[in-house]
Image (cartoon, helix red, strand yellow):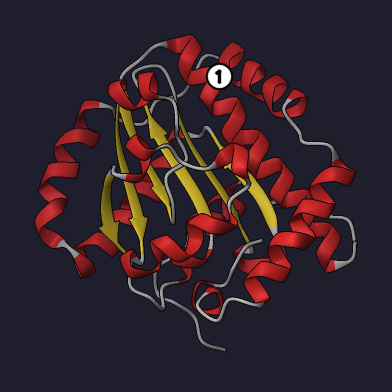
Amino acid sequence: MYKWYLPTLSELIEQSEPLSIAVKPAIAQQVQAERRWYSAIAALHILLQETQEAGILLAGPVPVLEQSDLLDRLSCWTFTPEPLLASWMPFLPPADRCSEAAATASTLPLLPNDPQAGEQFCMILTPSFSVALAFGEGVTNVPAFRFSFDPEVVWQAWRSLRSRLLLTQPQSVSRLDLLVDQFPPIAPDYRLVTRFSHLLLTSLPDATEWGIASSTRRFACRNNPRSAQIRCRC
């Protein structure tokens, strides 16, 4: 079986914090993981607004922040197969569409056949916490949302993204190295992790409504020939 030589963020997080996933239909697993991903992004928005800190955010394959005040404080970079960015945008839920400012954030290329381009991910480094999040299949090939505040896992996530950048745009590595050096991965206060977990639960979209919306997006992806190139996660 073909195996990409660099792990995805889902695989890195899964190896450090394995999930016990109940046996469910594939679509049910997909919808559940998708709901948790968008809930986590909503929780991150709130957490970043509360901490009011500067930092660096690496995400893909589309930007995850939309508030201008956050974009002013964070250095945001998006890893994406750049020609395919536009084809992803129509399938994001309207409430989560990226703002004009976010859409123009710095982009960094991924190789089109890189499995990292087929999952949604986000890594944030700030003075008080660091976290890596991913919505993908991991080594189990089961759709799942995973996250970790473990500094070692976050550091491995950065090294994995950095290695990819050495293949596609090595001239950008030194600039990102300088930014990451300002915000090395750090273990957060347990209260911050508790706060994130609480926000994660309270931000979950309604399961029934999300299932209907997710089915609509899957139909759109199946009927867009370019979506197959990016392993649409709708």
* 38 or 68: nearer the viewer: 68
- Tell me the residue that label 1 is attached to: 46
Q: Is residue 107 above or below residue 83?
A: above
Foreground residue among 45 and 137: 45
What residue is rendered at 44% in x and 23% in y?
129
What kind of residue is marked 1? Answer: Ile
Quadrant holding the C terminus = bottom right
How many labels, in total? 1
Quadrant assignment, res 152 = top left
Asked if residue 213 is positioned above or below residue 43 in the image, the reply reads below
Residue 128 picture location, percent across and down? 40, 16
Direction from residue 76 to residue 9 in the image, left or right: right
Residue 109 lies in what quarter of the image?
A: bottom left
Q: Quadrant of the N terminus?
A: bottom right
Horizontal side of 117 relative to 219 (left or right) equals left
Whole-percent x, y for residue 62 in the image: 44, 51
- Residue at (77, 36) in percent of width and height: 205
Crowding at dot 1, Cα within 10 Å, few <14 / some 14-19 / many 20+, comes out as some
Q: Secondary structure at mark 1?
A: helix
Residue reaching furthest bottom?
1
Residue 88 can be seen, yes or no: yes
Q: Position of residue 184 (x, y in %)?
A: 30, 30
Q: Is residue 99 above or below residue 54?
A: below
Classify 221 as above or below 57: below
Q: Position of residue 147 (x, y in %)?
A: 59, 41
Query: Is residue 19 at least partly visible in the picture?
Result: no
* Residue at position x 40%, y 61% in the image: 85
